[in-house]
Image (cartoon, rainbow, N blue to C red):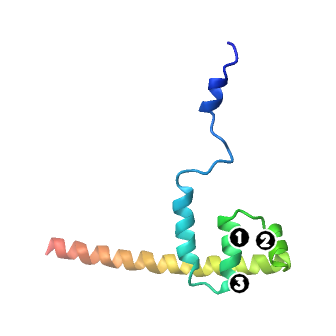
């Protein structure tokens, strides 16, 4: 088989963004808005911008441990927010099911 440059067009670029990435980034941005500024910045640098912990620490001029701590607290807060949303959605679904069955 001979080399055909047309084959290159069928290979995905591993550094290219996926179609889901902008939607996921928008969800992350909405979720981090209520966080304290320090946590919000760390979350955005790492989750959206794709910086490593070390890079984020360098950008913010803080120790790596501070990045880890802020990111951990931010993730806990966001996790709690999503758990609350899930509970609300389950309650709404249950109420809707009762209305339909009534």
Q: Earlier in the sequence, mark 1 or mark 2?
A: 1
Identify residue for label 2. Answer: 56
Q: Residue furthest left?
A: 102
Identify residue for label 1. Answer: 45
Residue at the image point whose x is 71% and y is 68% from the top: 46
Left or right? Give the position of 34 relative to 68. left
Q: Earlier in the sequence, mark 3 or mark 1?
A: 3
Q: CA distance from mark 3 to mark 1?
A: 11 Å
Please identify the quarter of the rendering in which residue 92 is found.
bottom left
- Image spot of residue 21 (x, y percent): 57, 57
Q: CA distance from mark 1 to mark 2?
A: 6 Å
Q: Does the CB distance between marks 3 and 1 fall below 8 Å?
A: no
- Image spot of residue 14 (x, y percent): 67, 44
Residue at the image point whose x is 38% and y is 79% from the top: 88
Q: How many marks?
A: 3
The residue carrying pointer 2 sits among few (fewer than 14), some (14 to 19) or many (20 or more) residues within 10 Å by Cα, namely many
Left or right? Give the position of 99 relative to 83. left
Residue 38 tag number: 3
Q: Earlier in the sequence, mark 2 or mark 3?
A: 3
Q: Residue furthest front?
A: 5
Residue 66 tag number: none
Please identify the quarter of the rendering in which residue 2 is found.
top right
């Amino acid at each position: 088989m001979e080399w055909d440059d047309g084959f290159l067009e069928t290979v995905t670029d591993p550094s290219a963004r996926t179609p889901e990435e902008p939607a996921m980034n928008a969800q992350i941005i909405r979720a981090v808005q209520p966080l304290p500024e320090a946590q919000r910045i760390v979350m955005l640098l790492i989750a959206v911008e794709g910086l490593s912990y070390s890079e984020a620490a360098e950008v913010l001029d803080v120790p790596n441990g501070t990045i880890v701590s802020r990111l951990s607290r931010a993730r806990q807060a966001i996790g709690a927010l999503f758990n609350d949303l899930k509970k609300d959605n389950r309650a709404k679904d249950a109420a809707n099911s009762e209305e339909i069955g009534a």
